[in-house]
Image (spheres, rainbow, N blue to C red):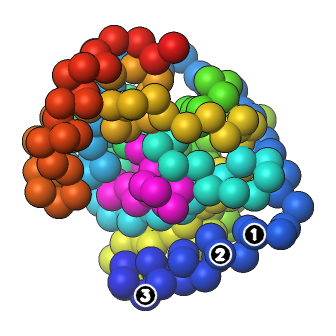
Amino acid sequence: MIPHLLAALVLVGTAFAGDDCVLTRPDVEGPYWLDGSPERSDLRIEGDGPLLDLVGTVVGDDCLPVSGAWIDIWHADDEGDYDKGGWSYRGHLFTDAQGEWHLQTVVPGMYPGRTSHIHAKVRGGSGITLTTQLYFPDLPENETDAFYHPDLEVLVRDVDVDGNMAAEFHFVIEDDGVEPCDGDINGDSRVNVDDLLAIIAGWNDPYTVDDLLTVIASWGECD
């Protein structure tokens, strides 16, 4: 399911060039965001479902891909409950050099007053944070959810007999095209242990000892 979806994503991402990219609609943050989520792209917990493979891109309003964009995700579990003190179904990830991202999680459950939704914060080089929510099409609860908007629906590419879903969403954010500073591997405008861990995880593919020395020499906030 996912290899076919990723191939489609490349085509969709390429189509942004020359298009009129409209900024993604913001939406309410809600009461359950927690700062400092772990960096990870797989939020799944064994036994929960249906599964969701969600891919997409982050581009600026100039339609160019934003590499190293920070995407923070949080949502309810499959029964509609949030982990209010821990990190279940919470995490952040970064776009790759082509502005692409891939999240593995579950389809969130509903709770009274809300349809199924995923919270997201997205930030590129401008430092401006987009706070929004993602929704799923064709749910009756969409009609009664005060925060739902069709512009924020994911594009569903596949659903199997168990309800496992493959979908995509493309964020358009305000971005000034500022490149990460030397040593800022993940593009969060500071050089710290997260960049050091990225170097270790990618040792020799693609990072080398020169990258390690750059991180050490550039430690701290970017200018």
Q: Residues within 10 Å of mark 3 (few under 14, many from 20)?
A: few
Q: Disc 3 designates what residue?
A: 4
Q: Which residues are magenta?
A: 94-113
Mark 3 or mark 2: whose residue is earlier in sequence: 3
Q: Secondary structure at mark 3?
A: helix
The quadrant in which residue 37 appears is top left
Position of residue 48 in the picture relative to residue 94 (left or right): left
Residue 165 visible in the picture: yes
> Mark 2–mark 1 contact, CB under 8 Å?
yes
Q: Indicate the amino acid at tag 3.
A: His
Q: In the rendered view, does 105 fall on the left or right side of 176?
A: left
Q: Viewer-nearest of labels 3 and 2?
A: 2
Which residue corresponds to mark 2? 14
Residue 82, percent from left and from top: 38, 29
Distance Cα–Cα, label 2 vs label 1: 6 Å
Magenta residue check for 107: yes
Mark 3 and mark 2: Cα distance apart in space: 16 Å
Q: Quadrant of residue 127?
A: top right
When the figure is inspected, residue 58 is found, relative to residue 9, above or below; the finding is above
Residue 103: x %, y % from top left? 38, 55
Q: Residues within 10 Å of mark 1 (few under 14, many from 20)?
A: some
Q: Nearer the viewer, residue 75 or 192?
A: 192
Residue at which label 1 appears: 17
